[in-house]
Image (cartoon, rainbow, N blue to C red):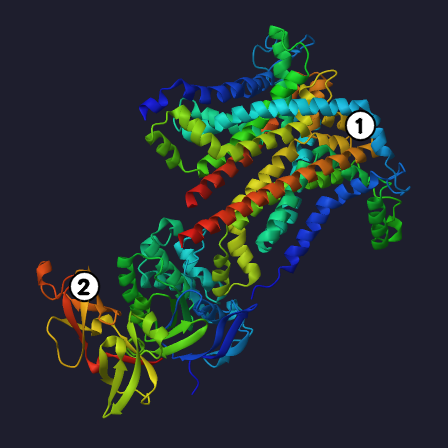
Amino acid sequence: MGWFHRRGWRDLIIGLPYLWLVIFFLIPFAIVIAMSVATKTPTAPPFSFGGAHPWVNLETYHRLVSEPLYLRAFLISLMNAAGTTLFCLLLGYPMALALTRVSRSSRNILLMLVILPFWTSFLLRVYAWMGLMGKSSWFNAGLTEAWNWLVPQSWAVAALPMMHSNFAVVLVMVYTYLPFMILPLYASLERLDPTLDEAALDLGSRPWQVFVDVTLPQSLPGIIAGGLLVFIPAAGELVIPSLVGDASTPMIGRVISDQFSQARDWPMASAVAVALLALMVGPTMLYSHYQARAEGTK
Amino acid sequence: MRRRPTFLLSVLAFGFAFFYVPILSMVVYSFNASRLATVWGGFSTKWYGALFANKQVGEALLLSLKIAVVSSTIATILGTLAGIALVRFTKFRGRTLFSGLVTAPLIMPEVITGVSALIFFLLLASWIGWPVQRGFTTITLAHITFSMVFVTTIVQARLLQSDRAIEEAAMDLGSRPWQVLWDITLPVISPAILSGWLLAFTISLDDVVITSFTTGPGSTTLPLLIWSKVKLGVTPDINALATLMVLCVGIGVIIAGVVMNRAEARRLADERLAYRSQA
Amino acid sequence: MAEFLQIEGVSKSFGPFQAVRDVTLSVAQGEIFSLLGGSGCGKTTLLRMLAGFEEPTSGRIFLDGRDMAGVPPWSRPVHMMFQSYALFPHMTVEANIGYGLKHETLSKTQRAERVREMLDLVQLTPFAARKPHQISGGQRQRVALARALARQPKLLLLDEPLAALDKKLREHTQFELMSIQARTGVTFIVVTHDQEEAMTLSDRIAVMDRGQVQQIGSPTEIYEYPVNRFVASFIGSITSFEAEVMARDGGALRLKVPAFGGEVTTKDANFAPGSKVTLALRPEKLVITKERPSGNAVQGVVKDLAYFGKDSLYRITLASGALVQAHAVNQHRGTETQRVADWDDQVWLSFDPAAAIVLGA
């Protein structure tokens, strides 16, 4: 194979994308990490590596763990992301399982219907919910009536305050990211051998036990993949909170963006970004661990 | 013995209602003469008129399309090369870093990608005087970078499935490696390259966050325009815009579906024919 | 007295397709009983009805006197060894074997004890902690067997138990299955398409075709005394000739067989003179000689021969144009010149009157 490797075209195939990613992804990212330990200055560009803290200034990270704004932002963002992941799982798992039970011909159409919202504009899907949740919408009016009918009179409201709340953020994130949960789940459930279910039934398990003992553990890689695909973008979400969230509730995505463009505090924005990324590393490692194990089983 | 999974099917039905009721509601209210979403003021197409009269929308759409075409084309070339490099060359210096670079943008929250791209461009401007102004070029560069890895993922998956032996057969028959690439590998993975391009195109066309960090004065893409309008509240002409978009996507999907179904039907018919002529 | 397993008039339809038609049979306790037939003959559907995965469209199944109608799979004292083995990939060998015991009121130590016994029975103790993908095909087969036996079922269903094994391993495993059956005393019902497998394993065989049972009997009965042409040709191979009964006299039957050189004598069978019948001859029952022997004999030319080592298969064309297959054991060691006959040799084919099978036309 020696001659195969010596040619220049091979260097080109590897080199072009490699160089591109180094310049436009690795270097910017390295700059962000370096920036997170720089010192904010009123110059342009607004940072320096000298002065009172030569080279490494850990003040940003100190602020990160001491100022309540950042802690709250992380806590709320992570809780919203966790809630979104959980609801996506609760709704997406039965949907994915149902997709494996319908006939092959209707399955392709239904799968297409799952992917279709993904191809329509993300912003417009958020916007659709703004329309539904607003106080003057038919949807809110209907829900309000149901609410007033269900609860004691003293709790009755004129319209449910759905917009500009964490509820709205989580609801819209579930709506946006649900396909990311369903597709990997479906992929892992569809691969399961139906005779395993029969074997478990034959050995004395009732259908729900078969689900717990056989289906659920085998779909774990799908759950983790779907969970990550939902959790990671949800944790750093910027657009949805800015449109349907409460402006006074801090969230990481907005904190990064505001620190950067409004406070012009590049080091702080970078530190928050690095911390967010650090939080994502754990779940991602878990995922690749399961992925590697799944490959080993084959 | 196999009972109908009633529970599962009802959740599925609920899920699809959840997916489509908001979209349908948007479509219906785009024809509402009244400004208010609760009141049905009769059928009207005036919001479409307002939309077409708005020159900003047309300009923004044009810019978005330009960026999407350029960025997805370059991203497809780079992403395909990366996919071939990762699958076909199992040993080269820095391969681990390379495969890391190809996966990292996939799992990086968009805000971080956006901020790092912006800092990079700002620093570049102050160090070497370029880019003087952010806009078409910087947006396109950022879009290429984060959409090429999606292309790589698709191409990689296709290459891993394809039979290595056909490439070896071509070499055995006297083809040089670059001829093998051109005659065999690329045609085999062409469906993956096409779907990679489509994915890169939609990602670019739809992106808000990274674009918002890398844009400059005067360069408003359609998503940025919608974002700024929607931030101010619900306006019915956006309903009209959404309806048109859903219509475009719907037509596109139906065409794609028909083409794919035909190809599949023809493949099945060919297989049956081959089988029969053999028997 | 009611039999241990009683299947009474069971039919099963899937839409317009009748998979099983009016099957009635009974199986004694401790028996190894095979359902033998080609693909689509209904044997697997019948097995799945015994396991409870399908309900009969009509008819009834009794196990040990209990009507099994409406009893779900998890409540039946019937366990199955699946063709694909259906081992749980996420559980160890030990956990797979112990899985069914979860549903019994056993203490932890009792359960562990039972699993150990089972591992011992199938000689897999050293592999207890492995996952299914870390053991060989033959070992997986034994895990599947141990898992199905762990709950001490009244009835064990084996779906093509040896199909996934290679030839050498299959022979060994056959005897192992029989010895395990003898030790545990569990009634085995085996579904197979492989006649040799059915013949060696079973006490009795039911041959099935197009949803119906064609014949039930011991391997010898099925092979030597098939009741119809399907059974005769499915089990082993035959060459068959159209024939007409000329006379019955003193325990013998005179047949007119135009394609086999005229008249032959066979052992008596219950056919009236004048009736049309089929004469079926098995290759190994035919004797090839160079000289004309006495009795049933016809002359032919060797068209083709295949050397298998221990024996050879000859294809011989008769004067009538009929092609007959005959086996001859290669008793003598030597080269080509020493075999019974060679290509294009004129030979005589003969058979003993008791060796021929006479079937209704």
Which image quarter: residue C215?
Answer: bottom left
Residue B89 rendering spot, x and y as whole percentages: 40, 27
> How crowded is the residue under tag 1: few (<14 C-alpha within 10 Å), some, or many (20+)?
few
Residue at mark 2? C312
Residue type at mark 2: give it: Ser
* Res A80 visible: no
Determine which of the numbered discs, if any, sits on residue A33 in the image. none
Using residue A296 as the reference point, say whether residue C334 is left or right of it.
Answer: left
Determine which of the numbered discs, if any, sits on residue B229 in the image. 1
Nearer the observer, A188 or B258: B258
- Which of pointers 2 and 1 indicates the residue nearer the eye? 2
Reply above or below: C34 against B189: below
Residue C155 rendering spot, x and y as whole percentages: 42, 72
Residue A163 rendering spot, x and y as whole percentages: 80, 38
Q: Residue at x 63, y 24 (%)?
A: B69
Using residue B102 as the reference point, say whether residue C312 is left or right of it.
Answer: left
Q: Residue at x 85, y 33 (%)?
A: B47
Using residue B252 as the reference point, say whether residue A150 is left or right of it.
Answer: right
* Res C190 visible: yes
Q: For the residue labelled by badge 1, is the local secondary structure a helix, a strand or a loop? A: helix
